[in-house]
Amino acid sequence: MGIFDFVKGQLIDVIEWTDPTSDTIVHKYDMNGKEIMMGAQLTVRESQVAIFVNEGQLADIFRPGRYELQTSNMPILTALKSWKYGFNSPFKADVYFVSTKQFLDRKWGTANPVMMRDSEFGIIRLRGFGSFSFRVTDPESLLKECFGTNSTYKVSDIEDQIKRQTVSCLSDAIAESKIPALDLAANYDELAHFAMQAINQKIAGLGVQLATFVIENISLPEEVEKAMDRRTSMGVVGDLNKYTQYQAAEAMRESANQQGSVAGMGVGIGAGVAMGQMFTQAMNNNQAAPQQAAPAQPAPAGFCPSCGNPITAGAKFCSNCGEKLQTASVCPKCGEPITPGAKFCMNCGEKLQ
């Protein structure tokens, strides 16, 4: 090997990165102790950004494309190294490739219940889960705020931070929306949109942004779900009379299927009729319960001969007109006048004393 081949082996003339993984956000190009040739070919693929770093200080940023490295397209690095015009010697610098693609199907969920004040059920606890996707929008901020001196930076290194912001912002979104618990399922899209805007405001300083945010489910406490089930059942029942008829028909069908004969059908009909009678009797009893029977009034012993008002036995004066009564001259049963000394009423045959 000649001296020229040895020197050439210590120089890098092609710089590129093909990501074999699906979760790498930042990759530091391995120089392996070599220097970069002036005029080297830099290839930046779609959904990538290449950043040159000189002695820990961010320099030039290259968007997707193919570049021949010269002082003309590395103005910041040229200034940092104080290169003169036409400089063509090899140089050292760190190169970082940042992936700007969407990182899809990242899961989020509430580790602890979210407290909410509902207008109908009072204070309740909610749990939720869903998915989101994000991408790097500001590679320079990401390297400054998150990356540090690592050789690689993966989704798992920033995902937990995004999840914590997600739960916090979603809790605020639910509380501020004041949507009743029964109507949350019909407003997932609106809540997700509101929450995503709030999350992006909080993580913008990290150089990343949510591309999508999906609420798959918000679960209610078991007690609230039972109350909802009871309310739904009452709505399904509707007309109680028709529901009773339906239940009677179902009892008839089940009895007939179990017995498999005419006798079984008779049992089913009897069960249905009995059920209908029981329900009707219960309804009648419920309606008649508030109406208490009036106390029985004593039967009148006769009628006043002056005004015809009923009179009680033994009364000496009429309670209506004050007429003095002669009990011996009036039948105590029908009130018809009787002749003195008569033993029986001529009108009704009542025995007289």
Image: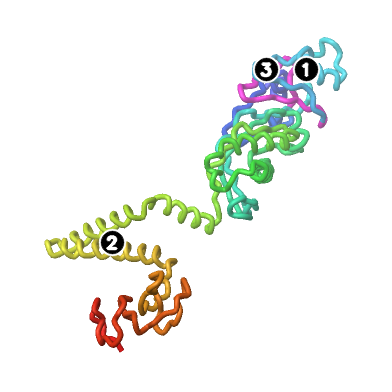
| Residue carrying label 3 | 41
Choose top left, top right, bottom left or bottom right for residue 294.
bottom left
Among numbered discs 2 and 3, the one appearing first in the sequence: 3
Between the C-alphas of marks 2 and 3, the distance is 91 Å
> What amino acid type is highlighted by mark number 1?
Met
Query: Closer to us: mark 2 or mark 3?
Result: 2
Q: Main secondary structure of the magenta part?
A: strand
Among numbered discs 2 and 1, the one appearing first in the sequence: 1
Q: Which residues are magenta?
A: 34-56
Between the C-alphas of marks 2 and 1, the distance is 92 Å
Tell which of 144 and 180 is nearer to you. Answer: 180
Choose top left, top right, bottom left or bottom right for residue 76.
top right
On-image quarter of the C terminus: bottom left
Question: Label for residue 74?
Answer: 1
Q: Is residue 35 magenta?
A: yes
On-image quarter of the N terminus: top right
Choose top left, top right, bottom left or bottom right for residue 249.
bottom left
Dot 2 lies on which element?
helix
| Residue carrying label 2 | 276
Dot 1 lies on which element?
loop
* Residue 198 versus residue 237 in the image, above or below: above
Q: Which color scheme is applied?
A: rainbow
Horizontal side of 246 relative to 41 (left or right) equals left
Label 3 neighbour load within 10 Å: few <14, some 14-19, many 20+:
some
> What amino acid type is highlighted by mark number 2?
Gly
Q: Residue furthest bottom?
A: 353
Q: Position of residue 80 (x, y in %)?
A: 85, 22
> What amino acid type is highlighted by mark number 3?
Gln
Q: Position of residue 270 (x, y in %)?
A: 20, 64
